[in-house]
Image (cartoon, grey):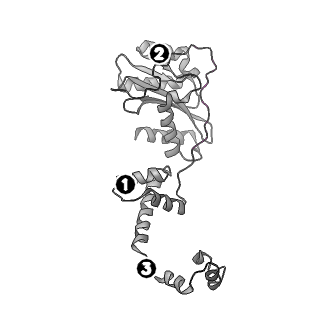
Amino acid sequence: MIEQNEKVYAIAMMCRALEVSQTGYYAYRTRSASNRELENQELLEQIRTVQKATRQAYGSPRMTRELRTKGKTCGRHRVARLMRKNGLGARRKKRFRKTTDSNHSFPCAENLVAREFTVSEPNRVWVADVTFIPTRERWLYLATTLDLYSRKIVGWGMGTENDTELVLRSLDMAVKNRCPGGNLIFHSDQGSTYAATAFTDELKRLGITASMSRKGDCWDNAVAESFFSSYKTEWMPENGYDTITEGMADVFRYIEE
């Protein structure tokens, strides 16, 4: 504090006010950095590197785990202190925007998943959802189909309209990528895009069984919701994208690269 304000206030006055010895202060200014300080500087550089790579997504607990996987010995409180001191906290999560229109007259399927998100093999349960992505031009919508076994996206579609065609493109890509056999459950919310006759007829044609969350219960489709949360917190620029094209390209990198 004295060092930061020595051009504003007299050093002697600040030392008296803070009950610090002037001799001790000048000794502090001239001594070389301690081993602990050097270690903190090295640790801080690694923290900055991780923050840059993850687009400032990690708080101190996750940052500590990441540093330890890289072979760095460090405590969570030490990491938290360095991050707090240098303004390196995680980005704040985005406000929720509802994309599900469940006020429709289409019939809804039974919830066959019932929050059982652990499966023993691939292509047994796929979960799907739609999210919005802000751009300066207009909203960009992303529909994904995720395999519960691997927790990986197996199909996706993007567009400027949140309609049934969007989710059909996601389903079509998943089917072409995975060529699933029988006994596949497709789980989604009760949105009109998934409940629409065109979509449910396509599931029947493919021999896929529909399953839907209970109305207004996001936890019934938590895995799909979690993917979107990770994307928006860890990857998407805080203020969205300038153009639709930029947003599409960045989403593609996040999913496919």
Query: Vertical placement of 140 versus 87: above or below?
Result: above
CA gap, disc 3 and disc 1: 28 Å
Which comes before the other along the chain, label 1 or label 2? 1
Q: Amino acid at mark 1?
A: Arg
10 Å neighbourhood of mark 2: few (<14), some, or many (≥20)? some
Q: Foreground residue, 73 or 236?
A: 73
Label 1 sits on residue: 68
Label 3 sits on residue: 32
Task: Please identify, in this view, whether the residue under mark 3 or under mark 2 is nearer the observer.
Answer: 3
Label 2 sits on residue: 202
Q: Is residue 133 left or right of residue 177?
A: right
Q: Quadrant of the N terminus?
A: bottom right
10 Å neighbourhood of mark 3: few (<14), some, or many (≥20)? few
Q: Amino acid at mark 3?
A: Ser
Taking the magenta stretch, the answer to whether it contains residue 105 is yes
10 Å neighbourhood of mark 1: few (<14), some, or many (≥20)? few
Residues marked 3 and 1 touching at CB (< 8 Å): no
For numbered disc 2, what is the local secondary structure?
helix
Q: Amino acid at mark 2?
A: Glu
Q: Quadrant of residue 243?
A: top right
Residues in magenta? Answer: 93-106
